Image (cartoon, rainbow, N blue to C red):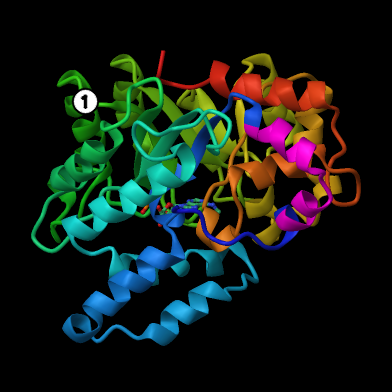
Amino acid sequence: PGTPPISGPSLAALNTLSEEEVEFILGLPKAELHAHLNGCVGMEVLFELADEFVEGIGFEQSSLKRLESFSIDDIGEFFKVFGVIYGLVSTREALGRVTRGVLGGFLGEVGEESESESECTYLELRTTPRRLGSSSAEEYLETVLEEVERYPKEKAGLIVSVDRRMGVATENESEGGITVEEVVNLAIELKKQGRRVVGVDVCGDPRSGDMELLKPFMGKVREVGLGLTVHIAEIPGSVSGDTQHLLSFTPDRIGHGTFLSEKEKEIVLERRIPVEVCLSSNIICKTVPDLASHHIRYYLERDHPIVLCTDDTLPFRTSLTAEYALLLAKSPFGLGLSREEVRRVAEWSLEVRFGGR
Ligand code: 6MZ
């Protein structure tokens, strides 16, 4: 229901598979652990919202059309996508609606989830709280949690994202913007109340922010037993010291890790930190030239846990099934892994989840 049309590298891989191979992928119990809510919204619901809002905010359908045929020259360009989406997902009602669609797209409708047809058997959806009109960051998370909690805990959990562009401490924030401190405190408070928050993420434009300043907050996250995952080394030569700071938070998982140095990769291997891998995302953002040179190979060769994820199904025109097709399809369309190897990847995804046990 919420799944956008697939195209690009993952569709090419999917098209080489037999029906039986697709069924094999669909039948594997697996978790999606790195999916950004607003990056996984279906086009249909965006068009519906645009129709409803057109008069109110003078929203241009043409900017939505551009979203459909979106091409990305570099990762910086990519973050502009969200301006259009945020313009439309701008009320609590709209947020609730898109969240329901995204959950349904990955898991199937509540109560009707079919193990052999849904994209995954467990979903850790992540999102960055925003102010919607006059509503607060807390109300944003409440709205999303209400939808997540319609599913049993064995099926769905929420990771609360901190954006690197946020101000850090609330007392220094004069414009009333949402801060890292506020988001982390909210995540902790909601967990204490028994709500379905399973972890915290650090995401956003990798060219921004000073990661050193985040350290005390991330320490608090770990103290209360929330999982911690960080987007790391997404671009070459990222802000100096950035990667070391992020590693010093001792994250439970890392996202991307495309440009980790040899030394940093050794730390990841030694501490056995699972790597969330988003193949189409990296290829489309051109941080990795092609599948053959993707760092997934480095970890697979070392039997190091990786989790295959979609990142943002809308701009990357993919689905979890199609990402798994990239593993199973033969070169040059895929990595040509054996079924046993693909099954192992699926098992890892369930082993390294933060919640749902
Ligand atoms: C870093 C990313 C991302 O939180 O509004 N986001 N951050 N790297 C990526 N991959 C290339 N893809 C998405 O979802 C959208 C937000 O997630 C982050 C960005 O901050 C984006 O604004 P939510 O639900």
Camera sees residue 350: yes
Q: Return the residue nearer the eye: 235 or 127.
A: 127
Q: Residue at x 72, y 20 (%)?
A: 344
Horizontal and vertical percent position of residue 195? 21, 25
- Asked whether, in this view, residue 129 is left or right of residue 65, the answer is left
User: Is 10 colored magenta in this rendering?
Assistant: no
The residue sitting at the right extreme is 331
Identify the residue at the far left of this view. Answer: 134
The residue sitting at 19% across, 28% down in the picture is 190
The residue under the point 30% across, 35% down is 148
- Answer whether residue 23 is magenta in the image: yes
* Disc 1 residue lies near ligand 1 with CB under 8 A: no
User: Can you give x and y, in whole percent of width and height, for residue 328 in the image?
Assistant: 80, 37
The magenta segment: 11-26
| Kind of element beneath mark 1 | loop
- Residue 266 seen in the current view: no
Which secondary structure class fits the magenta region best? helix
Q: Residue furthest top?
A: 357
Compared across the picture, whether 85 is left or right of 237 comes to left
Quarter of the picture holding the C terminus: top left
Asked which quadrant contains residue 184, the reply is: top left
Residue topped by disc 1? 195
Q: Is residue 123 above or below residue 126?
A: above
Q: Nearer the viewer, residue 222 or 331?
A: 331
Density class for disc 1 (Cα within 10 Å; few <14, some 14-19, many ≥20) is some
Residue 24 x, y percent position in the rendering: 72, 31
Where residue 274 appears, as percent x and y from the top left, is 60, 24
* Number of numbered discs: 1
x 68%, y 15%: residue: 270
In the rendered structure, which amino acid carries the disc numbered 1?
Answer: Arg
Q: Nearer the viewer, residue 349 or 26?
A: 26
